[in-house]
């Protein structure tokens, strides 16, 4: 397996942010499991307060529409790390849990958002030093000629240390049917880091479920290094409307009653067409509505009409009714 060489920063003596050292009265015990009485109370307030876990999970509920199973899995991971932190406070050290994960689902279902949020949770709970997200694809890892892949992959790993490495469409890294492909070297380096540096980096691989399953079968040893498999379902029309409302609120817009009904019909049609991308398609549709609203209001102002604040913040049915999505067709997604 290729060496990481100078690409992997030294970690000796590096203290994780927010780590709880064992309390002084427990620090010198040789066998805390048996020497500490079972009814000894454990101070939970500090760990809970420093982790901001309640606020983070509340933000998760606000930022992610539906995805109840996904949220449940994230809560499980957060709970594990909080309790692990409390155990360390009384000297009950244990091996750091493996948190590498695979997120499967169609585009726009929230995988990147969840990966970034996991970085923040892991940072606050002292699992990683920085908590930042480095998002990459095959092009960032795999070179085009011999000797090019190792330095590219090493540099990506170096940037991601202390945080989360998010690899979108991870199955594209390694092409088993192409013997001249250089992706195998990148995969071997990633496997080494996932095993040897798992206390300082979390690797999150994302993509379509079918392709990810084949990727696991093509790469021996990969599946055993992944502790968490989380599937992201497509959104319903009602859930897509909830996403739209969140996006509009963030941008200080609103839909008129007729506009809301028109946009719902737009989403129902768009959802059945090729290359639908869930939340991304919602955003694209709203961007087109804003563009048509701007043209409508500009023309009105040019004709001498006085615009109001209500005009500036309201998207009307006519701003979406012109969309070619209602006409259907294979290229409707490009004509939102």
Image (cartoon, rainbow, N blue to C red):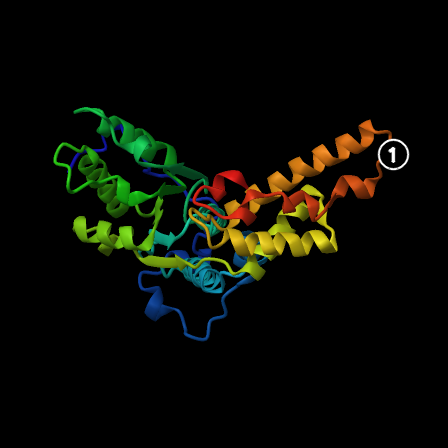
Residue 14, image x, y percentages:
38, 39
Q: How many marks?
A: 1
- Residue at 72%, 48% (x, y): give it: 254
Residue 167, image x, y percentages:
35, 42
Front residue of 323 and 228:
323
Rendering quarter of residue 149: top left
Q: Quadrant of the C terminus?
A: top right
Front residue of 241 and 144:
241
Q: Secondary structure at mark 1?
A: loop
Neighbour class for label 1 at 10 Å: few (<14), some, many (≥20)? few
- In the image: residue 263, left or right of residue 268: right
| Outermost residue to the bottom | 39
Residue 11, image x, y percentages:
33, 37
- In the image: residue 245, left or right of residue 201: right
Front residue of 162 and 298:
298
Q: Quadrant of the N terminus?
A: top left
Is residue 68 something one can see in this rendering?
Answer: yes
- Residue at 25%, 26% (x, y): give it: 151
Can you say whether 281 is above or below 230 in the image? above
- Residue at 41%, 37% (x, y): give it: 134
Residue 265, image x, y percentages:
60, 56
Front residue of 289 and 324:
324
Q: Which residue is mark 1?
A: 306
- Residue at 87%, 29% (x, y): give it: 304
Is residue 56 something one can see in this rendering?
Answer: no
- In the image: residue 130, left or right of residue 304: left
């Amino acid at each position: 397996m290729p060496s990481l060489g100078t690409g992997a920063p030294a970690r000796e003596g590096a203290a994780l942010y927010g780590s709880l050292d064992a309390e002084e009265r427990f620090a010198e015990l040789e066998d805390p499991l048996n020497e500490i009485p079972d009814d000894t109370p454990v101070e939970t307030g500090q760990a809970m307060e420093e982790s901001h876990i309640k606020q983070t999970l509340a933000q998760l509920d606000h930022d992610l529409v539906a995805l109840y199973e996904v949220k449940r899995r994230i809560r499980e991971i957060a709970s594990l790390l909080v309790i692990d932190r409390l155990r360390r406070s009384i000297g009950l050290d244990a091996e750091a849990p493996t948190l590498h994960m695979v997120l499967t689902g169609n585009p726009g279902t929230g995988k990147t958002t969840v990966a970034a949020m996991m970085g923040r949770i892991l940072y606050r709970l002292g699992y990683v030093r920085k908590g930042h997200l480095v998002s990459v694809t095959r092009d960032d890892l795999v070179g085009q000629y011999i000797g090019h892949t190792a330095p590219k992959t090493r540099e990506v790993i170096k940037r991601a240390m202390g945080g989360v490495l998010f690899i979108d469409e991870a199955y594209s890294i390694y092409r088993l049917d192409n013997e001249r492909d250089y992706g195998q070297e990148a995969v071997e380096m990633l496997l080494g880091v996932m095993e040897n540096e798992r206390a300082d980096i979390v690797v999150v691989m994302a993509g379509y479920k079918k392709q990810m399953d084949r990727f696991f079968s093509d790469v021996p040893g990969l599946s055993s290094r992944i502790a968490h498999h989380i599937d992201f379902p497509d959104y319903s029309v009602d859930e897509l409307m909830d996403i739209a409302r969140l996006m509009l609120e963030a941008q200080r817009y609103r839909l008129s009653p007729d506009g809301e009904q028109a946009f719902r019909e737009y989403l129902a049609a768009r959802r059945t067409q090729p290359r639908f991308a869930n939340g991304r398609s919602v955003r694209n549709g709203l961007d087109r509505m804003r563009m048509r609203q701007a043209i409508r209001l500009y023309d009105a102002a040019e004709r001498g009409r006085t615009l109001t604040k209500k005009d500036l913040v309201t998207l009307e049915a006519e701003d979406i009714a012109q969309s070619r999505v209602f006409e259907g067709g294979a290229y409707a997604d490009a004509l939102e």
